[in-house]
Image (cartoon, coloured by chain):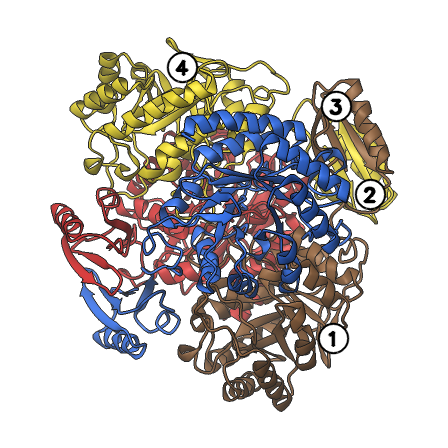
Chain colours: A red, B yellow, C brown, D blue
Amino acid sequence: MLIVMHHSATNEQICAVEQAVEAMGLKSSPIPGSLRTAIGVLGNQGYVDDSSIRELPGVRECIHVSKPYKLVSRDFHPESTVVEIGSVKVGDGHPPVIMAGPCSIESEAQMLTAARVVKAAGAHILRGGAFKPRTGPHSFQGLGIEGLKYLRLAGDESGLPVVTEVMRIEQLDDVCRYADILQIGARNMQNFDLLKEVGKLRHPVLLKRGMSATIEEFLAAAEYIVAEGNSQVILCERGIRTFEKATRNTLDLSVVPLIRKMSHLPIIVDPSHATGVRALVPVMGKAALVAGAHGLMIEVHPEPEKALCDGAQSLTGEGFGELMKEIGGLLTYLGY
Amino acid sequence: MLIVMHHSATNEQICAVEQAVEAMGLKSSPIPGSLRTAIGVLGNQGYVDDSSIRELPGVRECIHVSKPYKLVSRDFHPESTVVEIGSVKVGDGHPPVIMAGPCSIESEAQMLTAARVVKAAGAHILRGGAFKPRTGPHSFQGLGIEGLKYLRLAGDESGLPVVTEVMRIEQLDDVCRYADILQIGARNMQNFDLLKEVGKLRHPVLLKRGMSATIEEFLAAAEYIVAEGNSQVILCERGIRTFEKATRNTLDLSVVPLIRKMSHLPIIVDPSHATGVRALVPVMGKAALVAGAHGLMIEVHPEPEKALCDGAQSLTGEGFGELMKEIGGLLTYLGY
Amino acid sequence: MLIVMHHSATNEQICAVEQAVEAMGLKSSPIPGSLRTAIGVLGNQGYVDDSSIRELPGVRECIHVSKPYKLVSRDFHPESTVVEIGSVKVGDGHPPVIMAGPCSIESEAQMLTAARVVKAAGAHILRGGAFKPRTGPHSFQGLGIEGLKYLRLAGDESGLPVVTEVMRIEQLDDVCRYADILQIGARNMQNFDLLKEVGKLRHPVLLKRGMSATIEEFLAAAEYIVAEGNSQVILCERGIRTFEKATRNTLDLSVVPLIRKMSHLPIIVDPSHATGVRALVPVMGKAALVAGAHGLMIEVHPEPEKALCDGAQSLTGEGFGELMKEIGGLLTYLGY
Amino acid sequence: MLIVMHHSATNEQICAVEQAVEAMGLKSSPIPGSLRTAIGVLGNQGYVDDSSIRELPGVRECIHVSKPYKLVSRDFHPESTVVEIGSVKVGDGHPPVIMAGPCSIESEAQMLTAARVVKAAGAHILRGGAFKPRTGPHSFQGLGIEGLKYLRLAGDESGLPVVTEVMRIEQLDDVCRYADILQIGARNMQNFDLLKEVGKLRHPVLLKRGMSATIEEFLAAAEYIVAEGNSQVILCERGIRTFEKATRNTLDLSVVPLIRKMSHLPIIVDPSHATGVRALVPVMGKAALVAGAHGLMIEVHPEPEKALCDGAQSLTGEGFGELMKEIGGLLTYLGY
């Protein structure tokens, strides 16, 4: 941390700050400049809490050099993490992994059909939501455990591993019983209790970026999981909230190469939630792969016009089949 | 809902949309304009899910007229709600209510001191956090139930009702036993399971605005609680996330008169979290009262420089005392 | 336009609104719903100014159906526009056009070297800034007309058409004399006087999206130019301002397929300004092409570490050469 | 500036960075930490351009300590600036100054009426726009010089100084002839050529914050004016663009106390453009005064329902009269 003093800070104020730093068990190193003095803080093994310093007299600002994450940073762990779900591998050196399926699980028949459709088109992992975080109290809220069973059944029949969202700690036992990957949704990205619990498990975790989370906060959330011992974390960009409302969210694709540089964890992209518009999903999915995404998560519904949730952003089985063919050509270009 | 067709939509496309509307049990009413046709959707008793319509051929966009909330809207419930916590009343026609106390409960001594300090200065409600949603895994996470007991003790000794955050459904029993008001934090504003559970209780609820929540989403979240039967909801503006980083969040004060117009629920302001800067808290607190806030939530710590959490935005007891004197003069101006 | 009345609006209020609509020379068509009345406004040939209606008693809100642009919309002009600069064609059906060169023109030697480098690598258009909008008063402000001459010379020597930014109406004569394409920068996207002046010319225009402009405002700005008679407009996405600061701006790539759907004008992408990070430029450039961009604008500097402006986001000649080879492979995949 | 090296940066890389710093004529001072080395840059007299450093091998990031402004900072110029327009004084120690009048000048009669109305209610300065930056090409664009004459006439008759927006350098002569204060609009906040020109004049300048400008950029824009010799600058907050669309912009009131702390220039607030909703203007205007604003800019139109521009956010003469009475009471509370 660097503590920047006011232009007119007195020697007494500078000394008081140095003492406060040393009271935290850290070392201070004054850097007298031509306009003002700055004080370097040394000896910390990670992020320093600045709240006892920031408001001391004469302090202009505290600038953090250490980041609030370390285990997930490439700086301290240069080797890329590859997450394995059975024979499916997500990460550097492996072809992108396509996760597909409906937004919500609606019935056994719907899931079995969806699984056949996405499997036939070449998807690697089946998705489906059993617990739905809907924005209005009267919307469809998901089938719960019943839905988990249909998902498992469809996964087993098609031979695809399955991923589903877990929204509460109490759901963890059930979700772990039926699912291969635990998804933490955007709204729960900073539900730290939940992050810690999945960190104690050995199931792979798919962590979605919160809709107003910075990259730094996103990585700090992943750090929570890894710090508990579970390093099998896949990050997922799904759009952020901005002033632009023409799309549901603003897909922040630059995050993909940036996170590949900053972290060793794999990162995938969900163009369905990011754009909210069916016609944009295939093109933005392909752009994400060129940007370096280790995979995609795509909503596919056999009959989107009858979907109980997010039908307008779901691809039909046919549309998904076409996309998978186009991705095939792209993979050749990308060298897979 | 109004369905706007493309300029070049065909009669067949228009008919297909009308049939889709009627298949939803609603009435369609075409409005032929000079440039294009629009189709009014009638007969709905609330928000209409447009996902089966939005992607039909020839549809340009769906415009929602009904809002995703109704019970909390002033349109349907013109009379202002006054939330009562013992003898303290929050809402129209009552002087603003000041809630104050430390960010986190750190010890029995700290809470008792804090309670005496804020009570002496004139606060009406005591706040303190037992469960802390911290952004880094190695930060102080709160004292839990131990903390709740200290809070209750401090409340009883000072005669102040107490408010504390509940982060998970499993904490509800404990929090209800010790606290007078249940706070739902910004990160949980769309934790719909939790909203529904507190909706089933009779404890007053303080609902904080999510950091990237629109006013519409904020009111829809309150609707979840009220829809379950608990109408004792206090809304709380605490800053939103924008491109400006000079303050911790951007305090959106215009929301205060706007929500007073749109909803019958009381709304208070938390200038401590909104600004994150001690020096700005008093002035923005007073501005909030002039903007029409029904109360303030202020972080006060007897020794902010030793606080385990958010010390830099906490007022000292002395600073809070001065603020309360200034608020006294302001209340005279405001007619209380 | 649709005027939504309050739930409790009286018949008198509804009549008064209808009369106000008719006073504007338009037709009103009431749509009585189960919860409230809405009033359709018919007969307008474009965007309606709602300011005389919005605050009438009983009005809840005015919802615009017509957009503030028409000439540039695909709805009214389905055929794609192809902008021609000599033999270079930008638009549907033509391979993506690569514009490259330094941020600012620094000397004759620098421009001649840059032109040779980007020409050799396969660029189609040479860029370089003579007038620089710098954020600090003591930064390098550009060479002005001197710079324009170097740019023209470099363009002539290499056989590349040249594009440069015009910042003020008074610069138009000079810029038109030396440049083939007039660039309107992000900060001038809503400089309506300037837009109107370039609209009267026949030079092709490259219009950059403002850093906080919605897609609707972006197209409305293009409408200003086209409305004056100049239909040779290329749109350029260059990142928007959001809460995320890890990149200079947030590249909003979804805008590319969206604008291709909404407008007939070509759209290119500037990954250099969007990301501000050299290492991200090539990968985001390629992603933009897969997203459907009709071209790219890339900063290339022979010696970026000596650049007077934006060196950190400029590719070296070597880096640009590699990118052009990778783009070559991508074009095969894209079918060119 | 502080240059933070990667954890794994080599000694050679650290040396190369030190040499690059010294090549810029500055001094480098390495600070070896427990996790990484940082390099302090000393000897600069202001903001350092980092573009030749940022991309050197082994550099993780450059952290700026000096700000891109100095003349306008309170750090280097502790004494508050008071801007004088005749006998009207704007700044610390003087009662808030109320500027009021219509958005656009529509006719001589309208301006004379408006001037009488706002003068009678107690306004100190008359506003009115002659050149209008409208977002659509077919909207009313202002009366130009004709309008300036009406404004001057109305100012002279009422005895009020007048303020009006100047949009282009070529308009400066005319605007200076007729107006007492030159307003730079939000869209021109970074029109650096224009800033420099008004910096050479001695007319007071009202500089509006750009709609996506950070406080730092806002102050850097003011620095442009002051650097040319004109220190008579009044800053004006008028709302920023965020994801929230319920108000036209998001009024960032915290900027008022923050700028009072960071700069010696006076700051006023424009609640009309910030909110865009007539009913919110008075309450947010009063909140702004409590937040410490040195004045307000309020749109007042004798007949808002007939206004050619922004009628929905204009107060009537009557509404403005009531607001001025309420402000009177508030001034007593504030000690004026």
Query: From mark 4 to mark 3, how far is it between C-alphas?
Result: 36 Å
Label 2: how many Cα within 10 Å (few below 14, some 14–19, many 20+): some
Residue marked by disc 2: B13
In the rendered image, residue B4, in percent from the top left (x then y), is placed at 76, 41
In the rendered image, residue B30, in percent from the top left (x then y), is placed at 84, 34
Label 3: how many Cα within 10 Å (few below 14, some 14–19, many 20+): few
The correct choice, above or below, for A120 with respect to C312 in the image is above
Q: Amino acid at mark 4?
A: His
Horizontally, residue D319 falls left or right of residue C283, namely right
In the rendered image, residue C18, in percent from the top left (x then y), is placed at 83, 28
Horizontally, residue A23 falls left or right of residue A123, namely left
Q: Amino acid at mark 3?
A: Gly
Residue marked by disc 3: B43
Q: Which label sits on residue C84? A: 1
Image quarter of residue C308: bottom left
Horizontally, residue A200 falls left or right of residue A276, namely left
Q: Amino acid at mark 1?
A: Glu
The foreground one among B66 and C135 is C135
The foreground one among B336 and A264 is B336
